[in-house]
């Protein structure tokens, strides 16, 4: 059976072989592997392997889960953000999980422009879904991290998703005695609530 059909079959028994293709040196193979992982959607199998996986392979799995509105994918990203072996990978998972904080209205019709991915989304993400609370709790938890990269990723994400419950925590993280203040240069948006 051609490997290109593995994702279409959505067969959980192929998950391990597809997941390991993320280590291939060919970018096309890695891309096809990510697409197949999304189709198979057995995120628990990846979650169970996070601690033992190579950081580069875990990054490929994170890319597969980015933008996927699936409770299992959000659980996987939260698991990597909390328990990933590599601090930079944990920070990447924090940034990735923020991409699915809320859902946008479905596309109706109209012109997207010449480069829709280059600017702000035309359809704002405003609708909560079953994964919203896990996303927000993971971001709030990452604010208290002792790893600066993870904490900064959480601050950036929370400023974008506008979580009113985390506003005080973000302010505390940006106090002058905190290392995050130097990285943000005192971002003025922190004082405003939307």
Image (cartoon, rainbow, N blue to C red):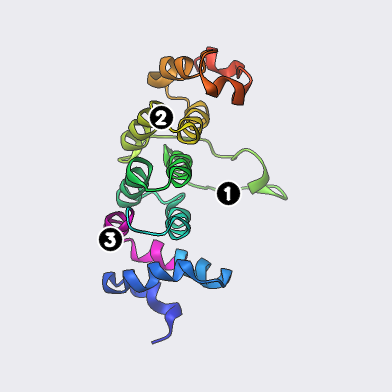
Q: Which residues are magenta?
A: 35-50
Whether residue 111 is visible = no
The residue labelled by disc 1 is: 109
How much space separates mark 2 and mark 3, taking CA atoms? 28 Å
Q: Position of residue 168 (x, y in %)?
A: 42, 14
Mark 1 nearby-residue class (10 Å; few <14, some 14–19, many ≥20): few
Q: Nearer the viewer, residue 189 or 128?
A: 189
- Kindly state the secondary structure of the residue where label 1 is placed: loop
Q: Position of residue 24 (x, y in %)?
A: 50, 71
Q: Residue at x 43, y 85 (%)?
A: 2
Q: Residue at x 49, y 15 (%)?
A: 193
Q: Residue at x 41, y 78 (%)?
A: 5
The residue labelled by disc 2 is: 146
Q: Nearer the viewer, residue 87 or 140?
A: 87
Mark 2 nearby-residue class (10 Å; few <14, some 14–19, many ≥20): few
The tag on residue 45 is 3
Q: Is residue 26 left or right of residue 2?
A: right
């Amino acid at each position: 059976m051609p490997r290109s059909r593995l994702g279409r079959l959505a067969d959980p028994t192929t998950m391990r072989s597809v997941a390991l293709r993320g280590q291939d040196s060919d970018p096309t193979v890695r891309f096809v592997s990510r697409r197949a992982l999304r189709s198979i959607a057995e995120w628990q199998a990846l979650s169970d392997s996070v601690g033992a996986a190579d950081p580069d392979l875990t990054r490929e799995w994170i890319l597969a889960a980015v933008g996927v509105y699936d409770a299992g994918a959000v659980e996987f990203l939260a698991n990597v953000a909390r328990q990933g072996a590599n601090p930079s990978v944990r920070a990447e998972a924090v940034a990735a999980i923020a991409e699915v904080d809320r859902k946008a209205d479905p596309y109706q019709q109209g012109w997207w422009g010449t480069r829709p991915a280059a600017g702000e989304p035309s359809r704002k993400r405003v609708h909560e879904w079953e994964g919203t609370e896990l996303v927000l709790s993971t971001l709030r938890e990452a604010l208290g991290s002792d790893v600066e990269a993870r904490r900064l990723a959480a601050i950036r994400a929370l400023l974008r998703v506008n979580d009113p419950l985390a506003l005080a925590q973000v302010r505390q993280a940006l106090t002058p005695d905190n290392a995050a203040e130097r990285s943000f240069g005192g971002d003025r948006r922190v004082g405003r609530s939307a």
